[in-house]
Amino acid sequence: MNKPTAISLFAGGGGMTLGIEQAGFESIFATDIEQSSAATFSQNWPNKQFFHGDIRRLTRDKLEAYLEGKRVDIVVGGPPCQGFSTIGDQNPADPRNGLFWCFVRVVQWTQPSCFIMENVNYLRTQYGGRFEREIVAAFEALGYDVTVKTLDAADFGVPQHRKRVFFFGTKLHNTFQWPVETHGPGRKPYRTVGECIADLTSHGQDHVPNHSFLQHGDKVVARYKLIPEGGRMPPPAELPEEIRRKNFGNTYKRLHRKKPSLTLVPGNNAFPVHPTAHRSLSPREAARLQTFPDTHIFFGSRAEQCKLVGNAVPVELARHLGLAAIKHIKSANNRDLPKTKMVSKQQALPLNELSKRRAVKPNGLTAVSFFTGIGGLMLGFLNAGFRVVASYDMKNSVARNLEQNFPDVPHKVADVGALSKKEILADSGLKEIDVVFGGPPCQGFSIFGRRRFVNTQNHQPDEDARNELSIKYVELAIQLKPKVIFLENVKGFVSTPRGQSSYLEEVERRLSKAGYELRHEVLNCASYGVAQARERFILVAWKKGLSFNWPEPKYFASPKSWQRPFVTVGDVISDLMDPSTQSAEFSHAPMNHKELVVERYRLIPEGGRLPEAELPEHLKKGYRSDSVKNFSHVYKRLSMNAPATTMVPGHNAFPVHPVLHRTLTVREAARIQGFPDWMRFVGTRQQQCTLVGNAVPPHLAEVFAVGIAKTIKGNFSAPGFKRDIYDLATAA
C-alpha cells in the first residue's frame, strides 16, 4: 500500500516534516523563504521537491508542476507567528499574520483529506481570540471540519515544556482523535534536559554537527556563574556593580538537568543557559531538546541555525500528530476520500469568499468617523476593537460602499463642514465620544491636486474651501471633547500656508488651547507594513493626563538581520495574476487598453518609466495627438520586489503592473493599500479607483488605533501579555 502523501509549508528546519515522515507519511514537497531552510532541506532530503521563495509567490501552476500529478493527503505547517507571539509585537496589523491565507489557498488548491496548522498558543486569546475564529471560518468555508487544541510538547516525550496551538481540519466523515498524552503526572515521567544533552558536555565543538558555542564576554560569564541550576539571575541590586544591567532580557535563565527545558525560542542569545556550563546552549543541544536526531544537520550561520531549531515543531510531537492523522485517514471509508487530485480553477472559491470580515472583540471604546471614504481608517479602528457610533461623508458612492461592507456602522451622507456637536451626539446616541478620527480632503494640500488646480486659476491655498475643511474638522472634534483626536493628510499639509502662518500651525494652536497634547510626523506607510511607499501626515492629539506612545517603524528598505524588510508588491498581488481570479464582482477586471497604449507598456522596464526619448514616432502621440510627456505619471511600472509608489485616484492614474502589460485593477490596488478581499467595491470603475486611491491604508490605521486604545485604557501591553517568554512554559 502506498504511503499517504504530505506537503510542508513554512517548513523551517524540518521538525514537522521529519515527524510526520516518522509516522508513515511520504513528504513530496516543502517550501520556505529562508535560504538556511532551503540548504537544510537540500542536505537532509536531497530528492524532495522544494520551493525556495516567498509562499505568496507560489502560484497554482508552479505547485502543480512540483507535485507532478500526485494527490496530497495532508498539508502541514506553521505560518510565522511574530504578530501573535508574546516575544513579538503582538500587533494584529502585522502583515505576517495574514500568511495563513497562503496556507488556506494551498489547502484549497490541493484539497487534501486533512491538514495540520501550528502556531503559538497566544493566538487563541490575543485580541479576544479573533484570529482563531478567522482561521477556523476560512477553512470551514472550504468544507473542512476544524478542531483546535493546545498541546504541551513535554506531554508527548519531548524534554521541553512548549505549548502550541494546533488546528486539525478534515473532509472525512469520521471524528479526529487527538493523540493521547504519554508523559507527565500519572503517566511516564517527563524526559529531562540531563538525559538528552549530558553526553554533549564531553564532546568538543568539532565532534558533533551544529555543536558550536558562543564566545561570551567576561561580564556575561560572570553573570552566568551567579545563576543557580534551574534558577534565574539575582535582582540587579544584588549583583556586583561591575556586572549590573537594568534589563537582562530573556537570556539569563539556567536549565535544570532533572527537569524538562523551558520553551526554546529562536535567536542567537535567546536559548537558555546550560545546566552546568557557563554558556548558552549550542544549536545541537537545543536540537536535542527539540528531539531532532544528530543526523539531521542544520545549515546557515549560527544565528540562522538557532532560528531553524528554535522555531521548529518538536519532531516527537509531530510524530504523534502524524500517527493520529494516519489513523484518522485509514479509519475513513474509501467513499470519504477526496476523488480529485487538485481542485480545478473553475471549482476554486473566489478569494473574497474565503476571506470574511473578522469577528473582533470590542475594547469598550467608541469613535466617530469623518470623511470616511471607502473606510480604510474606519476598518483599522474596527479591527482594533472600537465601536464606530457614527460615520459621515458627503459622497453617495461612499454610502453605497459602506452599506455593502459595514452595514452595522451608522452612516450619514452629510457635509462635515455643516455638522454640529448636537447633531453628532444625537446620531451616536451617546453623551460623549472616546475618539474622533478622519482624513479631510487633501487635494488642496497635495502636489498632484494643487498642480491640477493651479493650471486653471490663480490658486491661493487659504482660499481653497477644501483646505478649510481641515480646520472645521479640528474645531468640530474639539467641540465633541474626545479623549483622542486623529488626523491624516498628505505631507503637503505641513507646508501649506494659511495667511501669515500655516494650516499645521493653526491646527496645533487650536488643539493646544483646547487642552490637548499632540505629536505629528510625516511617515512612510511602507515602514509600517504596507506594500506602498506612501508618505502621509499623521497627527495624534490626546487630553492632558493621558500618554501616547508613537508607534515605531518596524519595516525597512535595507533591514538588519533582526529587522523586517518592506512588504513588496509581489508579496500582495502575485496570486492575482491567475486569470481564474478575475471577475467584475471582485473588482479584478483588467482594462482593455488600446494597442498603442499596450505597445508603450511593453517598453517600460520593471520598476521603471517609459523611455520617452527612445520611442518610435508612432508612439510619441496619443489618439488625440496629445504628447506622451503630458501623461508621464501614467507610464510607470511597479517592481515585484519593492513597495509600490503612492496609489492615486483615477482609472488611468494607477501604475502599470510589474510584469503584465496593463494598469493595476481595483483589486490589485486595494491589495497594495492593504484592504482585505472580503471587501467589495461598488460603483463605476472610476468611483472605485478614486475611493481606493484616496484611502488610508487599514494596516497603518490599525497600528495607530491599537496604540490609541492603550492610551485611553492605560494598558501599554495587550491583555495577558507576559514580558518573560519563558513563563509560557507554565502558562495556560
Image (spheres, rainbow, N blue to C red):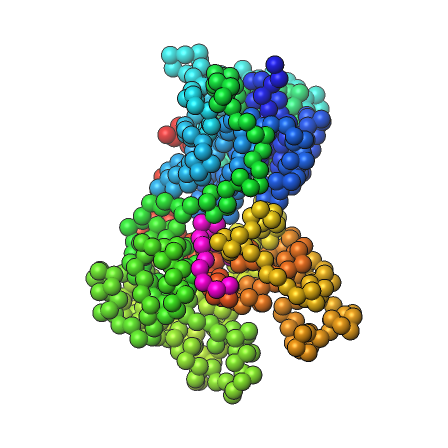
Q: How many marks?
A: 0
Residue 629 spot, x, y in % from top left: 68, 75
Q: Answer whether residue 682 is magenta in the image.
A: yes
Relative to residue 388, is residue 635 depicted above or below?
below
Q: In which quarter of the image is residue 657?
A: bottom right
- Give the extent of the magenta segment: 673-685
Q: Does the magenta stretch include residue 697?
A: no
188 left or right of 59 in image: left
Q: Which residue is drawn at 36% across and 55% down?
A: 406
The residue lying furthest to the bottom in this view is 458
For the C terminus, the quadrant is top left
* Residue 493 percent across, percent down from the top left: 47, 73
Look at the image and tell me in which quarter the N terminus lies. Answer: top right
Q: Nearer the viewer, residue 439 or 268?
A: 439
Q: In this view, does 468 lie to the left or right of 629?
A: left
Q: Residue at x 44, y 11 (%)?
A: 188
Residue 303 lies, with reference to residue 274, above or below; the image says: below
Could you say which is closer to the camera, residue 397 or residue 205?
Answer: 397
* 714 left or right, relative to 301: left
Measuring from the top left, give residue 569's x and y in whole percent: 60, 53
Would residue 466 be visible to someone looking at this image? Answer: yes
The spot of residue 306 in percent (x, y) is: 60, 33
* x 50%, y 52%: residue: 586
Give the camera-side residue of 525 and 391.
391
Asked whether residue 211 appears in the rendered view, the answer is: no
Look at the magenta stretch and give its main secondary structure. loop
On screen, residue 450 above or below 66: below
